[in-house]
Image: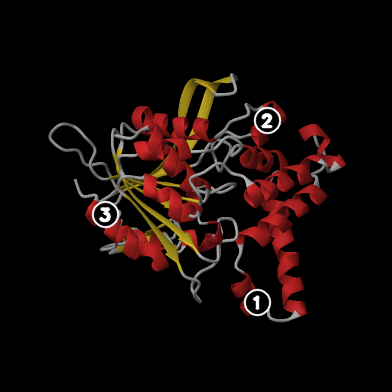
Amino acid sequence: MFAVVCGFPVSAQEVPQSEGDYVAHDFHFRSGETLPEMRLHYATYGKPVTDASGRVTNAVMILHGTTGSGRQFVTGQFAGVLFGPGELLDASRYYIILPDGIGHGKSLKPSDGMRMKFPRYDYADMVEAQHLLLTDGLKVNHLRLVMGTSMGCMHSFMWAEMYPDFMDAAMPLACLPVEIAGRNRMWRKMIMDSIKNDPAWDRGNYTQPPGNGIEGALNLFLIMATSPLQLQKDYPTQRQADDFLEQWWQRGLVRFEANDMLYAFDASRDYNPEPKLEEIKAHVMFVNSADDQINPPELGIAQQEIKKVKNGKFVLLPITDQTRGHGTHSLPAIWKQYLDELLRESQP
């Protein structure tokens, strides 16, 4: 007998599901700002297992991308491939933790009332808050695996550097372990500028959503995060392409809040794990896709930088009918064989 919890089949008896909020009190941001209460939302599946010394041995944390949330992983194409009975991260054996980062999902964010008075958080703040959630909130003192997609990929590298003894393995998916520069920085700045340059934004104090600014941001998001091959195959006529674009705008204008989006992209401003890659102790399986326009393989950065990671491997997935550009990070059917390899090689 199986029940469906948030979209994927799990054992009703063996896999408890929990969702809640952790509040970090007097949280200090690297900007020098503080909040008396910093709320982090999370969901968990399964239950923690500890060894004789009290160390948690089966915790897996999965980190989402920019403007996303932990809920993006509770789908048939992700959880259905990894969390189900007998799968690599079977939720009856692993304690799966899906946090919403600062400024994302149901965690505290600018749109909850502070707008542009919200502290100017960065990735280091987000990782520190996740660490507090685990250690203080969930009483998890060790991770079997930290995995992340896009922004979560970058957070995975930061986790492996900031807390090098905290995890056995890390699987960063779809990013580069260097400062965000070149076109990657340019398209992010264009998104932020598109919002700020819309007169309706009014320095974040808008009374009507700055639709033109958000639409401009959505246009860039679409071009950078998708696969030209698949868009051509899925929308082979002018009419189909135009209809899809109209639907994309309509969904995005409802989903995205201007200030939240602005903060989320700005948070990447000082990301740069490159100087400390040699200090990483965890086994790292770093995976990118050849059709990812945000992290294009011709830069050669991933191939070069992974050499600095003592127990690191890099895999470049070739373009196929199954890859979806940057979004390939959320299709484990394509890359789960490398997760299997990582789990076997990093076995304590």
Q: Nearer the viewer, mark 1 or mark 2?
A: 1
The residue identified by callout 1 is 232
The residue identified by callout 2 is 113
Dot placed on the residue nearer the N-terminal end, 1 or 2: 2
Depth check: give the residue in front, 201 or 150. 150
Residue at 62% x, 26% y is 119
Q: What label sits on residue 95 in the rendered view?
A: none
Q: Amino acid at mark 3?
A: Leu
Question: Which residue sits furthest left?
Answer: 52
The reply to whether callout 1 and callout 3 are in contact (CB within 8 Å) is no
Q: Amino acid at mark 1?
A: Gln
Residue at 77% x, 54% y is 215
The residue identified by callout 3 is 343
Q: Is residue 211 left or right of residue 131?
A: right
Dot placed on the residue nearer the N-terminal end, 1 or 3: 1
> Where does the image place residue 125, in percent across and percent down from the top left?
51, 30
Depth check: give the residue in front, 236 or 278. 278
Q: Is residue 117 visible?
A: yes
Q: CA distance from mark 1 to mark 2?
A: 41 Å
> Where does the image place residue 208, in percent across and percent down from the top left?
82, 42
Dot placed on the residue nearer the N-terminal end, 3 or 2: 2
Mark 1 Cα within 10 Å, few/some/many (few <14, many 20+)?
A: few
Residue at 36% x, 27% y is 136
Asked which secondary structure carries label 2, the reply is: loop
Q: CA distance from mark 3 to mark 2?
A: 42 Å
Q: Amino acid at mark 2?
A: Gly
Mark 3 Cα within 10 Å, few/some/many (few <14, many 20+)?
A: many
Q: CA distance from mark 1 to mark 3?
A: 36 Å
Q: Is residue 181 left or right of residue 146?
A: right
Residue at 36% x, 33% y is 163
| Residue 276 in which image quadrant | top left
